[in-house]
Image (cartoon, grey):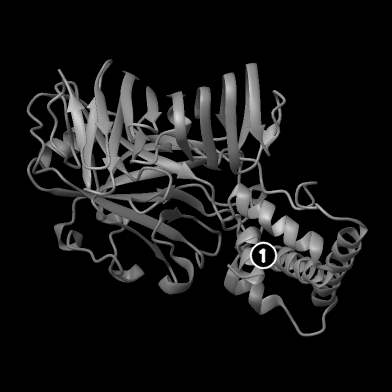
Amino acid sequence: MDPQTQIQRYLLGDLTEDEVAELDKLLNDDPELRREFALAAAMDTGLREVAFERSIEPAEAVSQIQPATSRTRFVLTAVVSVAAAVIVMVSLGPAFLRAGLFKAASVATLVSSENAAWESSLPTTPGSELAPGVMKLVSGVATVRFTSGAEVVVEAPASLTLNSTMKAKLEYGAAVVTVPDSAIGFVLETPNGYAVDYGTQFAVRVDQREKQSDFEVIDGEIAVHHPETGDEVRLTGQGKTATISEAALVVADFEQQSDSIETSADVIRIGTNGRSTSILRNNKRKKFINPEVLSVKRTNSGKWDYRSFFAFDLSTVNLDNVGTARLRLNLVPSTRGLVSALPKVNRFGIYGLTDQTKADWEIECLWEDSPRPEDGILLGMFEINRSENRGSFGIQNEELLNFLKKHDGSSVTFILIRETTQINGVGPSLTHMFASDSHPEAVGPMLEFSFD
């Protein structure tokens, strides 16, 4: 890998611990490369600042920027100033990567460290914030709590890679994972496969010698995946286990088909299987619609309104003995707009589509042709504080259950909107985002049925 590629990958946060050490050595030995790194880092910082400002409302922000304005000069001056400062810092001495000159955002906190010995470039003092990276526990027990709320208790000897607030990888060793509602969809990878957590507690052990990973449910439910074979299994209930080896996924004491639907006697969960999308009033899909999220927004002018809709196939579910139904959505951090422009509490509405002429909607349909709240009935509302950027939300009531039973055996579409609007400005308020089936970390829309 050439040094320029290493620099680019470092700024993106894609380098491993060993690759960071290699880059650090190259920068230590080459003053010119240090200068290149400093300029690249400054430019990256400046561009991120500009992108953040533009994200207030991309089209309007661009139209407001005029050539040679004081605003433009300020941004350019900031970039040049950062570049100069970085060059000075880099020229002062080597090993600036290890010194933490450029720190990645924290994804977790080291809660406790019990008689622990470490081999880690990340902090090992309890209470320390942890950026993405590798933590090798030589002895003892340690607890890592991710900012999403997921908690991982690691038992030595073990190696845990922190990827993001919703994803980690156990290279070897043992761990117990606890996931609250705020972190449903947390993913724990192993060298053989991975588990997606649906609000539960489970244990995992990775045996390097046998080249296999063992998963056991302590309480709740997980989905275990084998990427090589494409197999998937849902494990529900205490003591249910699965083993992933290089060749196969084997379930112990639990008969379960590898399907997208969980079919235990107590609960059934189904997803949208890709039938979810968002729409923007100006129909500029390619520029502003991200297929990984379902966007919802309501503005004073209406120009930047988003709404989302998604469908579930009920043909695989027998609703005769269903006692309760819940529609669950997972809120994920938004990349557009300002929280401060919103009221402290934001209200969302979920509508069930009743106009069957709109039932065959396309993923890339236009605003004018898409399902609207007026095309259905209000099934329920939920609220999100403006300070929250993660969590599990949705509705569970008789209206939802009755609507589903009226459409037993067919497909149903739900429409999601934000009922409340901004309190300041015209367009800069936050666009709320919920995970779709394509989201890399969180679980998409889900219907959960429990039985009498």
Q: Which residue is at the front of the view, 407 or 275?
A: 275
List the residue tagged with mark 1.
7
Q: Is residue 433 visible?
A: yes
The number of numbered badges drawn on the structure is 1
- Locate residue 75, reporting x and y percent: 80, 71
Position of 219 with respect to 179 (left or right) is left
Task: Name the residue: 66% across, 46% down.
Answer: 105
Q: Which residue is at the front of the view, 238 or 66?
A: 238
Q: Is residue 373 visible?
A: no
**Residue extending furthest toward the bottom:** 67
Task: Say above or below: 135 vs 312.
Answer: above
- Res 92 → quadrant: bottom right
- Res 205 → quadrant: top left
**Residue extending furthest toward the front:** 209
Q: How crowded is the residue under tag 1: few (<14 C-alpha within 10 Å), some, or many (20+)?
A: many
- Res 316 → quadrant: top left
Position of 64 with respect to 391 (left or right) is right
- Locate residue 370, reporting x and y percent: 29, 64
Position of 405 with respect to 416 (left or right) is left
Secondary structure state at the residue bearing disc 1: helix
Task: Say above or below: 146 vs 57.
Answer: above
Amino acid type assigned to the residue bearing label 1 in the image: Ile
- Locate residue 436, reporting x and y percent: 36, 51
What quarter of the picture does the N terminus occupy? bottom right
Q: Which residue is at the front of the view, 56 or 217?
A: 217
Task: Name the residue: 69% across, 34% down.
Answer: 129
Position of 93 with respect to 327 (left or right) is right
What quarter of the picture does the C terminus occupy? top left
- Locate residue 209, reporting x and y percent: 37, 32
Task: Name the residue: 65% across, 79% down.
Answer: 63
